[in-house]
Image (cartoon, rainbow, N blue to C red):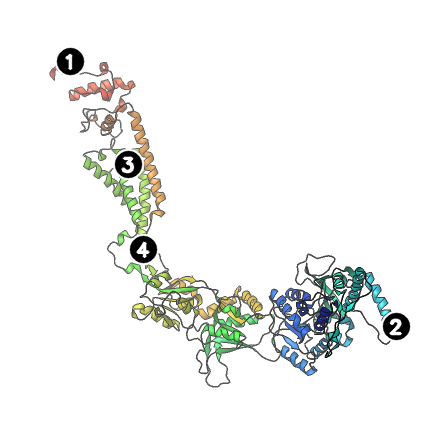
Amino acid sequence: MQTNFVIDLGEKARVPIISFSATSPSLTSLPSTYFFRATQIDSSQVKAIGAIIKAFGWREAVPIYIDNEYGNGVLPYLIDALQIVEARVPYRSAISGSATDDQIEKELFKLMTMQTRVFIVHMPGPLGSRLFAKAQKLGMMNEGYVWIMTDGLSNILSSINASVISSMQGALGVRTYVPKTKEIVTFRDRWKKQFHQQNPTIIDVELDVFALWAYDAAYALAMAVEELGTSSFVFQTTISSTNSSSDLETLGVSQNGYQLSRSLAKTKFRGLAGNFSFDNGQLQSSIFEILNVIGAGARAIGFWTPENGLVRNLIINLTNTSVPNLGFVIWPGEHGSIPKGWEIPTNGKKLRVGVPVKYGFTEFVKVVDDNSTNTTPDVITGFCIDVFNAAMEGLPYAVTYEFIPFAYLNGSSAGTYDDLVYQVFLGDYDALAADSTIRANRSLYVDFTLPYTESGVVMVVPMKDKNRIKNAWIFLKPLTWDLWLASFFSFVFIGFVVWLLEHRVNEDFRGPPSHQVGTGLWFSFSTMVFAQRERVVSNLSRFVVIVWVFVVLILTQSYTASLTSLLTVQKLEPTYTNISHLISNTKEYVGCLDGSFVCDLLQQGFHASNIRKYKSAQECNQLLINGSQNGGIAAAIDETPNMKLFLANYCSNYTMIGPIIKTDGFAFVFPKGSPLVPDVSRSILQFTEGDLMKELERKWFGNETACSVSNPMVSDSSSLSLDRFWGLFLIAGVTSLLALIIFVASFIWSYQHKGIRVMLEVFDCKDLSSHTFKKKSLGDQFERSPSCSSYSISPSNFSHSNRTDITEMGEQAILHAGQVEFPASVLDLPNSKIPTAPQSIQENN
């Protein structure tokens, strides 16, 4: 307030005002070209304090400050700095500068009842000395407490009484770093000598940084005057009224003040306290030194720089990233272990842990109300309670707590789970041990630990046996229509290929056209039951048939197995597999647990009249049995842990679909910013990775494995499709085509000089060169075929090397048949070589 007044005078008189002690950030809001702050602004140290809080992992801190312009000015900047490092300010302790010792003790007693044990003290020396003396008296300078002083106290430690220093043991401090140069050592010696001469009764006096800033400020002013080059400063006086109530109204205006201000603003030099220069009238920020009060003074444990943050040494910036990057600290109580920053209040108060009152699924939480006496606590058990107890027992420190049901006086539930979670935000509960799900809207006002159960919202629907449905065409169901068609066309194709390969060499595949078609199809389809009677004599046919029989064997065995499964094995399938089908069917109803957030989620897709609530697993089972048409439901939609517990009791009739909605599972609830959250979360991780969680699940939910074994598996009952057998058909097709190509190529090569008509005539005749006809008589080697225009002999015997044999054969034939015609188009022999009948035979005929 004094500085504001003087700044206003300097602005009116146009005289530079230099302050080496006004550190409040609120002064920066005063627009004045004549004000120069030759000291560090308080807000420049808040980042260093925030770095200390972050380095030691503290989540909460309480500022204790003087309730005036000096204390209130830095508070917004300090809170912002703590928020950046994710530290919370649960309380602000403002102490009046005129507070009595009793008032200070009362405020300290209030702080002792809170969990937070990290305090940031921002107040001048006289009040700060009294505060630490009272804190030591109340035992707040013992183990577990953390005290951090701003430069308001740290900068004047050298001038504080030794008895006060003894009450600050273990406290940390932030002060402006002043390098120990040769100039400052010489200056201190000269100043001490002069001060002792003027004050012989005062000993052991040290200069603080404010004195150094004062010296540098005077030095800067002298440099500015020298630069201005004037030795006289002229004031232009003003004429005041006769009724003037103050001499301030006669204050003149400096004629040289503006030039002096500009000269002062440009002054730069190396002062006793470090580099000295102004930026918009403010002294540039410098390095801060981190102190630890030990013994009769304080020792430096590190530094904070705007560029590197916390460092152990200014000369060598160590690359060690260990946290914290400071020297060894001796904490209050002369302990070397880092305080966790919070404790259970010392006033004997226990943590109030809220629990829900449930009517169903009591395996999670069960509250037994003892109506015999009001003094007897309720009996609270359940899976969630055991998990909470195990998590608290796993903490590295003891925490006392008590379970308090969220219920009315008559024992009934006092609200929904959202209402229960909101009570933690209101402060009615310090924690919540329940099957409460992590939700985004809830996380806005409370903190959750890590989840200790599976996540997700699932749907439970009844099972139906598809095989119980009577169907006269069930024998077609083992194969899909595409596999049936592929099999049919494959049988036809194989029959055609075998007929083509066997027609000229096998009597079974000859005869009238209708007989040949029937024989080919009969042979192919009879392979299904391996009842074919026709022999195959061609090697190509045998190759094709062997491969095809292998394919048929696999097909028939697969068909038999699938049909047997359809007729004998119970095939269960869910009545609904997708929630969208239920949404589109307005005649179906769905169920949800009364009081659960799932009911609110369902209203986003279902009409409110299509949602029926249940309170227990037994009621849910009855609703599913009744079905939508009889006042029940078609599906129950709830969280995974609840539905797994439901299936553990009714596993043979239902199945679980999903998760249909993603959630983060059950977790414990604490107030926003509670320091217990990270420790409890770590404890949950430790015992969930071991056998303790499995033991608790078996204790409350039974042996789920036994249930899952007796529970028939959900079958998709899909028929065998072509996708599973196309490889077999490919092998059979490639084999048949290969044999067909070999036969056709060989036949065309043998009759490459004949026309297509002749090739067709020859193909329809027997191949007398085949071994199947060699055992017959010679006369039987000639056949009158309906498609042949004359008798024919196998063209394989018509090579020029065998013409003599052909002639002899013709003569023998004449003896047996009387006359044989050998068309030149078939034999392709010169007329002179065609055998003729003897003269005697010709005459007789």
Residue 430 figure quarter: bottom right
The amino acid sitting under disc 3 is Val
The amino acid sitting under disc 4 is Ser
* Residue picked out by circle 4: 565
The residue at the far bottom in this view is: 373
Cα separation between marks 3 and 4: 35 Å
Does 41 sit left or right of 764 as displayed?
right
Residue 427 coordinates in the image, percent (x, y): 54, 76
* Residue picked out by circle 2: 197
Residue at position x 35%, y 57% from top? 715
| Mark with earlier residue (1, 4) | 4
Nearer to us of marks 1 and 2 is 2
Q: Is residue 332 above or below residue 490?
A: below
Q: Quick one: label 2, few (<14), some, or many (20+) residues within 10 Å? A: few
Does 722 sit left or right of 455 as displayed?
left
| Mark with earlier residue (2, 3) | 2
Q: Quick one: label 4, few (<14), some, or many (20+) residues within 10 Å? A: some
* Residue picked out by circle 3: 497
Residue 525 figure quarter: top left
| Mark with earlier residue (3, 4) | 3
Quadrant that contains the C terminus: top left
Q: Nearer the viewer, residue 782 or 271?
A: 271
Does 474 sit left or right of 372 as displayed?
left
| Mark with earlier residue (1, 2) | 2
| Mark with earlier residue (2, 4) | 2
Cα separation between marks 3 and 1: 49 Å
Q: Is residue 815 above or below residue 37?
A: above
The amino acid sitting under disc 2 is Gln
* Residue picked out by circle 1: 839
